[in-house]
Amino acid sequence: MAPEKCIESLSRRDYGEFSKELNRIAAKISWGVSVKKVIFDFVRRTKSWLSQIVMFLLMEAIDVGGGTIAMVESLAKFNMMTREVEKEKKASLRPYVLVPYFAAVLLVATTLMTLAFTSKTIEIGGTIQIDLTSITTLFTSSIMVHCYLIGLVAGKISEESVAAGFKHSVLLVLIAIIAAKFTPMLVGSGQK
């Protein structure tokens, strides 16, 4: 079959989310638009790097006359292997997403406990009066910025996108605020 006929016959099957795009491609081809233009339009619209690569390679193979069954099979194998590698990579990185959350809580707790113990030590010595509130505010603010940046890293690790890190950043900052509220209570209760 010619590539155009293959695309038209494939558009009758269900491919999940891709079915809409495939139907759009088949409709344009049936209207007489060239396969090259239709595929370039698809590549510009899609955000999936894998889809872009596969469609580009398919278009190049059709363009030079190499659209054989063996080539399409090797392209399908490449696609399946790449998806498997991506799935394994996500599964192996999943535990590392928890590390920034533990790091945020530990960072808040250790910093505030160190400040509290330092201020108590200075009070026992009785030599210097320090404004612990302003120092705590300064350190807590810098910790919040640090937690925000850790969240961006967590998003990059988990979903391979810095933009996805914004939700992790918000969550980490909230966790850090909660930890900042409870840590002084824990330090204070340990002294009684």
Image (cartoon, rainbow, N blue to C red):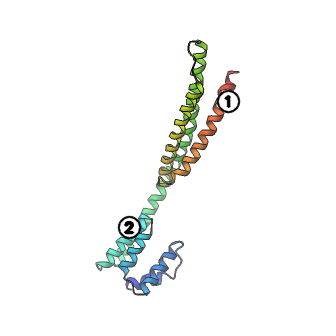
Front residue of this view, candidates 18 and 119: 119
Front residue of this view, candidates 23 and 116: 116
Q: Which residue is mark 2?
A: 53
Q: Give the side of residue 9 with respect to residue 114, left or right.
A: left
Looking at the image, tell me whether mark 2 or mark 1 is earlier in sequence order. 2
Q: Which residue is mark 1?
A: 185
Q: Give the side of residue 117 with respect to residue 92, left or right.
A: right
Determine whether the residue tagged by mark 1 lies in a helix, strand or loop: helix
Eye-nearest disc, 2 or 1:
1
Task: Measure the alpha-carbon separation of dots 2 and 1.
Answer: 55 Å
Label 2, residues with CA under 10 Å away: few <14, some 14-19, many ≥20: some
User: Is 164 placed above or below 27 here?
Assistant: above
The amino acid type, in three-letter code, at marker 2 is: Ile
- Residue found at the far right of this picture: 192
Q: Give the side of residue 16 with respect to residue 188, left or right.
A: left
Front residue of this view, candidates 111 and 51: 111
List x then y, in percent, for residue 152: 49, 48
